[in-house]
Amino acid sequence: MPFGGRNYSIFAFLAGVRNFSGVQPIAPTRGLPPDAGRWKGIKLGRWDHSWLLIHELGAFDYDAEMEDRRIKQLGTHYDQPISLPPGQGVRQSWRAFLTDLYFNELSELQRIGADRVVFGFTG
């Protein structure tokens, strides 16, 4: 399953979910696509369902600079990430923020000729 791991940078980019980085998602969540009823037995999570065209993902400017405001609050029970105020985060490219994990998944979707990725989240 593409983008199936727990990566909060990717979640924030795709849908603004677990967005401790304070980034603008690539698009607002759209809900499930109209033809989602034909899929049987596919689990997409319980909330924030959305979908993106592979073309949209491929056309994004990943070399543009962004600010990652996520930091880890060490010493807490879950080491919960928190957000820094705007202007105090790390400036980097989207490419660095999303890491090779994202681009490997996107390359695979392009290689197999997928037209879109559909996703949702669980807690």
Image: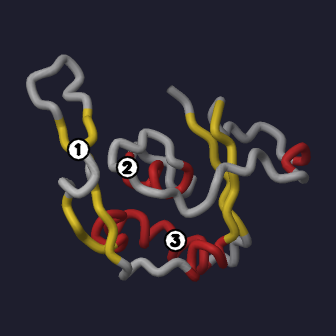
Q: Tags 1 and 2 in contact by the CB under 8 Å rule?
A: yes
- Which of 52 and 86 lies nearest the eye of the viewer? 86
Residue at numbered disc 1: 84
The residue sitting at the left extreme is 75
Report the Cα–Cα distance between label 1 and label 2. 9 Å
Location of residue 53 by image quarter:
bottom right
Residue 35 image point, x, y percent: 90, 53
Label 2, secondary structure: give it. loop
Is 2 situated above or below 8? below
| Residue beneath the point at 73% across and 51% down | 30
Report the Cα–Cα distance between label 2 and label 3. 23 Å
Label 3, secondary structure: give it. helix
**Structural crowding at the residue carrying mark 3, measured as other residues with C-alpha within 10 Å and reported as few (<14), some (14–19) or many (≥20):** some
| Residue beneath the point at 25% across and 35% down | 81
Residue at numbered disc 3: 106
Residue type at mark 3 is Leu
Residue at numbered disc 2: 22
Residue type at mark 2 is Gly
Which numbered disc flags the more N-terminal residue, 1 or 3?
Answer: 1
Is 5 situated above or below 109? above
**Structural crowding at the residue carrying mark 1, measured as other residues with C-alpha within 10 Å and reported as few (<14), some (14–19) or many (≥20):** some
Report the Cα–Cα distance between label 1 and label 3. 29 Å
Residue 94 image point, x, y percent: 36, 70
**Structural crowding at the residue carrying mark 2, measured as other residues with C-alpha within 10 Å and reported as few (<14), some (14–19) or many (≥20):** many
